[in-house]
Amino acid sequence: MIRITNLQKSFLLGPKKNMVLKNVNLEINKGEMVAIMGRSGSGKSTLLNILAGLVKADSGSYHFDNNDVLKMDSNQVAEFRKCNIGYVFQNSVLIDTKDVYHNIVLPLKYSNYSKSEEKKKISLVLAALHIEKLKHNSIDTLSGGEGQRVAIARAIIQDPKVIIADEPTGSLDEKTEEDILRLFTIFNKQGKTIIIVTHNQKVADSCDRIFYIENGCCNLFTGY
Ligand SMILES: Nc1ncnc2c1ncn2[C@@H]1O[C@H](COP(=O)(O)OP(=O)(O)OP(=O)(O)O)[C@@H](O)[C@H]1O
């Protein structure tokens, strides 16, 4: 489903080039749940952003269902993202001037759904994430775990093929972390491909495979 070959990504740091991803090769199959680990600053979020089509690599190739994402223009990338990717960002990034309902509905605004279709879709995800009661709550009243559920609801509202999550359990207590992890496992069993960046070994161990980014390369973790 996802095939990345000889991928490179650098950022300019003043006059200097910071080569973050030097040679990434990665294949993820449909229906897999994989973890991406690595030290802080190793390039995990950068790789997720490339996978989501939010950041363009310098060179190499990225194929999604045999479509070459790096060759797409900005409109095609936006369409690719809308149809395929649900992104749970690090630290939720919910809009605190909007309530739960209006945060979740946001991605649908780029499609032509009627109000009643929107409502139906939102009811389904609110139920899937057990947050029906929070529908009209404002964001600043939510606990960390509730906020993360809302972020996940927003990521899955378009029924994406792939859910990408950047440290989805980062700031949560152990029980809430388990609840959130269980949700990802359920979505995975329902057929979603899941890619999770995590520092948490327990989260990683719940995945089918673990990749480790080090020195700009991404390798399969084969054992302790
Ligand atoms: N837009 C940007 N401009 C310049 N440098 C960037 C940009 N985005 C990321 N970087 C740099 O790329 C490197 C990798 O960052 P990235 O966020 O991908 O790491 P990470 O592995 O996700 O880290 P963490 O675990 O701390 O979240 C860092 O040195 C960072 O400063």
Image (cartoon, rainbow, N blue to C red):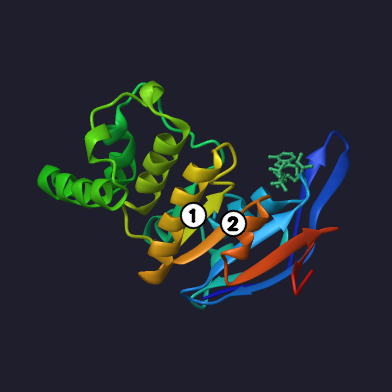
Question: What percent of the width, then of the height, locates residue 116?
Answer: 10, 46
Task: From the viewer's perspective, tell me whether residue 13 is left or right of residue 209.
Answer: right
Tag 2, which secondary structure?
A: helix
Q: Mark 1 highlights which residue?
A: 181
Mark 1, Cα crowd under 10 Å, few <14 / some 14-19 / many 20+, is some
Q: Position of residue 186 (x, y in %)?
A: 39, 63
Q: Secondary structure at mark 1?
A: helix
At a point 51% along the width and 76% down the height, the residue shown is 1
Residue in the image at 86% along x and 45% along y: 17
> Which of 113/209 is in front?
209
The quarter of the rendering in which ligand 1 is drawn is top right
* Mark 2–mark 1 CB contact (< 8 Å): yes
Image check: 183 left or right of 99? right
Q: Nearer the viewer, residue 143 or 81?
A: 143
Q: Is residue 11 visible?
A: yes
Identify the residue shown where x is 23% and y is 28%.
Answer: 136
